[in-house]
Image: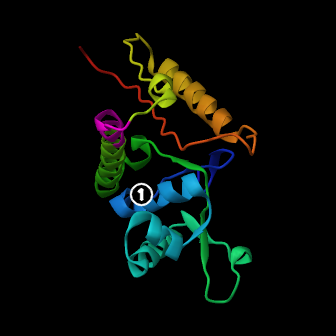
Amino acid sequence: MSESEELRPGIRRITEAAVLSAMAHPFRARLIDALKVDGPSTASALSQRTGQAVGSVSHHLKVLSEVKVVEEVPELARDRRERWWRLVNTGWSWTSSDFADDPVAATTAAAAESAHFNRQVARTHEWLDSHEPAGAWADAAFATQNWLHLTPAELHEMSAEIVELVQRWQDRPVDDDAELEPVFVYSRGFPSQP
């Protein structure tokens, strides 16, 4: 499977360590999240959203552009100076086996996975530590865990079903009058012992 091949519509299979390295940088990961939540944006708007300097945002967008994670959207520009950016794909996927033959790439893949996990945990802590009243969101938020006995093939099948479910919710038609908020959803499944 080539580095640019899509597993599912909009989901890019990553097989190059340089792409993972670019995406794992904490600020670049934040820019990716902002573009995923808010859609196409300018460096200036991303600067305001993140509190970082426009020059820094532009630099990191260029790095992401070089590995084809983001791309310019010239049709959104109102003049020659304005540059809009969007994500090339709606998601990414990789497996450690794609990098097994190259120890440096395998280390990069492991570091990228660890960085993504740390951001997931940090977001979870942020939610749990929030002292603001959450109202209906407190009742809607969920966590689930269970111990299952599965084969690798069954875990792979379950993973595909979970990803498909989340994708279906992402792609659903949305009423323009609905009061929507960004919601962070993640799930993991891996062999372990109590």
Vertical side of 75 occupied by 154: above or below: above
Which amino acid type is shown beneath numbered disc 1? Ala
Name the residue carrying label 1: 29
Rendered location of residue 149, percent (x, y) = 40, 10
Residue neighbourhood size for the residue with mark 1, other residues' Cα within 10 Å, grouped as few (<14), some (14–19), many (≥20): some
Please give left or right for residue 152 compared with residue 92 in the image: left
Magenta-colored span: 123-132
Q: Is residue 124 left or right of residue 158?
A: left
Out of 23 and 97, give the one closest to the viewer.
23
Outermost residue to the left: 194
Query: Which of 138 and 39 lies nearest the eye of the viewer?
Result: 138
Question: Which quadrant is the C terminus positioned in?
Answer: top left
Q: Would residue 71 appear left or right of 116 to someone viewing this image? A: right
Residue at the image point whose x is 43% and y is 74% from the top: 57
Q: Is residue 88 magenta?
A: no
Name the image colouring: rainbow
**In front of the other: 29 or 143:** 143
Residue 24 visible in this rendered orientation of the protein = yes
Q: Main structural element of the magenta stretch: helix, strand or loop?
A: helix
Residue ID at (69%, 46%): 9
Residue 50 image point, x, y percent: 41, 64
Q: Residue 151, how many percent across, how many down? A: 45, 16
Quadrant assignment, res 117: top left
